[in-house]
């Protein structure tokens, strides 16, 4: 009996401390029908050299490994898009190069896929922090609709790694991450994949180890208070909102409710910083939301008006 080919897609950038562990975990999988697609996003360190050194220990895997190099650094979203474009598998499994897989990860995911003919199969993950490691229990959903709604939420649940995804969901529907938006890109893509998926399933097996100790990762460079992360999260949610505009009114409405929170946060930031032009731009985007999604609480109204008071005081001070 033939089994589906799984393309494991791995972006490579600034991971010289982690790349060996990742590569070994993929090439040592108990499931044999795997190809590995690495994308070198012009990594400035020795990540790619270490990758090639590890590959020498697996001479029998030469024919199932691809290394694609970008001509310039284009970011995580572009690297994932490139890996997808060069993949030949029936299914895609994304792995970040500072993370690693359980040795039976692909086998367990494929087994469940074959039992249920699912388009997406989600496995469990272990989060590794500097002080502890804990199991991220990804929920099991009773319906496809619940799964889609959860993918729209700005939470850890919508991460794209640790999932076996039918490649045709991407290719048949033109799905790819928006290049240049490298935080929240999973939110964009998983919302769309979930919408087009028929059957979705989960397994209780741990398939992925998510390492949060890499200080050079996108997520660790910009915490939730950093303006760049807030802007990219906002742009990702706008992609989701725009996708659902002509497809599902309730999901579009849900995305706008989260956008209201993002816009309000940006208004506060720009107001406190006295950035008039940026403040006006976000205010206009807030006004563009559906009427039911742009209502402010009294506390938010006070914060909004405080910017105007700041501008008046500032102008009087500099007369």
Image (tube, grey):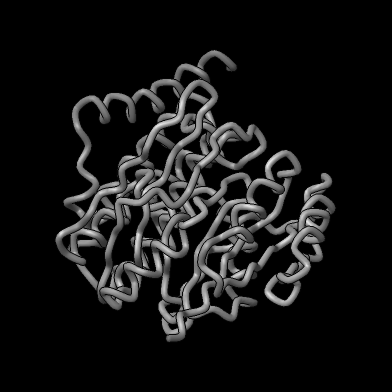
Q: Is residue 290 left or right of residue 101?
A: left
Q: Give whichever of 225, 190 is nearer the camera.
A: 190
Q: Based on the displayed image, in which of its 4 quarters is residue 61 positioned?
A: bottom right
Residue 75 seen in render: yes
Q: Percent from the top left, x then y, of residue 316?
A: 51, 16
Tell me if residue 29 comes above or below residue 262 in the rendering: below
Residue at 59% x, 17% y is: 318
Can residue 270 be seen here?
Answer: no
Q: Is residue 170 left or right of residue 45?
A: left
79, above or below 258, in the image: below
Check the picture and name the quadrant holding the N terminus: bottom left
Q: Residue at x 43, y 40 (%)?
A: 126
In-front residue for pair 48/222: 48
Q: What is the residue that sits farthest to the top in this orientation? A: 317
Residue 180 figure quarter:
bottom right
Q: Quadrant of the C terminus?
A: top right
Residue occupying the point 59% across, 81% down: 88
Residue at x 53% of width, y 51% of height: 101
């Amino acid at each position: 009996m033939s089994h589906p080919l799984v393309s494991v897609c791995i972006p490579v950038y600034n991971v010289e401390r982690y790349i060996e562990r990742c590569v070994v975990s993929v090439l040592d999988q108990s499931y044999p029908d795997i190809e590995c697609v690495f994308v070198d996003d012009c990594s400035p360190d020795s990540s790619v050299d270490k990758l090639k050194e590890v590959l020498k220990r697996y001479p029998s895997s030469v024919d199932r490994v691809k290394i694609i190099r970008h001509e310039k650094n284009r970011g995580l979203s572009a690297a994932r898009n490139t890996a997808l474009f060069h993949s030949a598998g029936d299914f895609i499994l994304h792995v970040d190069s500072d993370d690693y897989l359980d040795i039976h990860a692909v086998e367990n995911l494929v087994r469940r896929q074959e039992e249920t003919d699912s388009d997406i199969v989600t496995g469990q993950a272990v989060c590794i922090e500097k002080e502890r490691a804990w199991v991220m229990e990804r929920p099991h959903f009773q319906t496809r609709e619940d799964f889609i709604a959860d993918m729209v939420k700005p939470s850890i649940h919508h991460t794209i790694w640790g999932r076996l995804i039918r490649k045709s969901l991407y290719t048949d529907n033109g799905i790819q991450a928006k290049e240049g938006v490298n935080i929240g890109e999973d939110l964009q893509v998983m919302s769309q994949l979930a919408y087009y998926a028929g059957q979705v399933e989960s397994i209780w097996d741990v398939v992925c180890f998510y390492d949060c100790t890499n200080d050079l990762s996108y997520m660790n460079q910009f915490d939730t208070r950093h303006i760049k992360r807030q802007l990219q999260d906002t742009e990702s949610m706008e992609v989701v909102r725009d996708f659902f505009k002509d497809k599902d009114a309730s999901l579009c409405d849900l995305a706008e409710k989260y956008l209201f929170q993002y816009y309000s946060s940006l208004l506060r930031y720009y107001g406190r910083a006295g950035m008039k032009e940026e403040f006006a731009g976000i205010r206009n985007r807030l006004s563009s939301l559906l009427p039911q999604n742009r209502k402010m609480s009294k506390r938010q109204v006070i914060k909004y008006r405080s910017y105007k008071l700041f501008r008046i005081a500032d102008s009087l001070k500099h007369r």
